[in-house]
């Protein structure tokens, strides 16, 4: 049985511990990710948020060694039997499935320091997404910004102005402080649009080494 990639260009891929069958995570594969998984022996996925192929563990080294790959009866979903090195979830937990709806509580503790693995920016962005999906009654400044688009946009403008003033007139410490405020509020804006900071990094990488004139000419008009 073969996958019809024209009919199903993106298929669900369930990562499962090959020894105890614990479900670790759900991701997606396109044809390239599927072929890379088979050829390398390590799980590769297509990230819908990053809009690119990613090898599981490419930044954390928490890779997934593939022991088997099972195709379902419709050939549009796969189970990837893996040996999980480290943890599967970006939150630092062994599995991505750690919230019990019936018990209304977190049932898995964090096992690793995500800041050290992924960096503060990526960790903060995922925290913002968690706030976005929190219940309406949840109270936090991030949730308030996400629920009030006009407030969010006004804060980004305000913080950008304060960075300019700090660069022009104030101390290095104040420039750092105001820049951190601007970065946080910009990440909230990215979270509102569900645009991963990785895509910004990709754009910066694309521009790296390109002259300003050529970069402007390359933009879609």
Image (cartoon, rainbow, N blue to C red):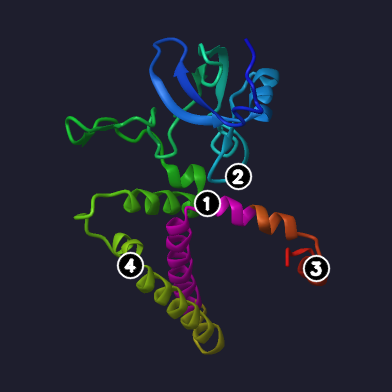
Q: Main secondary structure of the magenta part?
A: helix
Picture layout, residue 191 above or below residue 152: above
Q: CA distance from mark 3 to mark 4?
A: 36 Å
Q: Quadrant of the C terminus?
A: bottom right
Identify the image quadrant of residue 25.
Answer: top left
Q: Quadrant of the N terminus?
A: top right
In contact (CB < 8 Å): disc 1 and disc 2: yes
Task: Give the mark nearer the N terminus: 1 vs 2.
Answer: 2
CA separation in Å, label 4 and label 1: 20 Å
Give the mark toward the camera: 4 or 1: 4
Q: Residue at x 34, y 53 (%)?
A: 132
Q: Is residue 44 left or right of residue 106?
A: right
Residue 95: in magenta span? no
Q: Magenta stretch: give its range.
A: 173-201
| Residue 26: % across, % down | 45, 29
Taking depth in this image into account, of 166 and 19 the one nearest to the observer is 19
45, above or below 147, in the image: above
User: Viewer-nearest of labels 1 and 3?
Assistant: 3
Residue 187 locus on image (x, y percent) = 46, 61
Which label belongs to residue 148?
A: 4
* Closest to the observer, 146 or 3: 3
Q: Which residue is mark 1?
A: 196
């Amino acid at each position: 049985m073969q996958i019809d990639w024209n009919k199903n260009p993106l298929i669900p891929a369930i990562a499962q511990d090959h020894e105890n069958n614990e479900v670790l995570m759900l991701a997606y594969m396109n044809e390239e990710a599927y072929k890379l998984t088979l050829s390398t022996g390590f799980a590769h996925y297509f990230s819908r948020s990053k809009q690119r192929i990613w090898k599981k563990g490419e930044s954390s080294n928490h890779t997934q060694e593939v022991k088997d790959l099972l195709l379902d009866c419709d050939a549009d979903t796969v189970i990837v039997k893996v040996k999980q090195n480290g943890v599967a979830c970006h939150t630092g937990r062994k599995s991505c499935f750690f919230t019990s709806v019936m018990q209304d509580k977190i049932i898995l503790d964090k096992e690793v320091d995500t800041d050290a693995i992924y960096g503060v920016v990526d960790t903060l962005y995922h925290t913002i997404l968690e706030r976005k999906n929190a219940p309406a009654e949840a109270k936090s400044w991030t949730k308030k910004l996400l629920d009030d688009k006009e407030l969010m946009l006004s804060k980004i403008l305000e913080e950008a102005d304060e960075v300019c003033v700090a660069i022009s007139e104030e101390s290095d410490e104040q420039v750092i402080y105001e820049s951190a405020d601007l970065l946080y509020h910009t990440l909230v804006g990215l979270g509102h649009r569900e645009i991963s900071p990785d895509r910004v990094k990709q754009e910066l990488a694309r521009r790296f080494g390109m002259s300003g004139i050529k970069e402007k000419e390359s933009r879609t008009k």
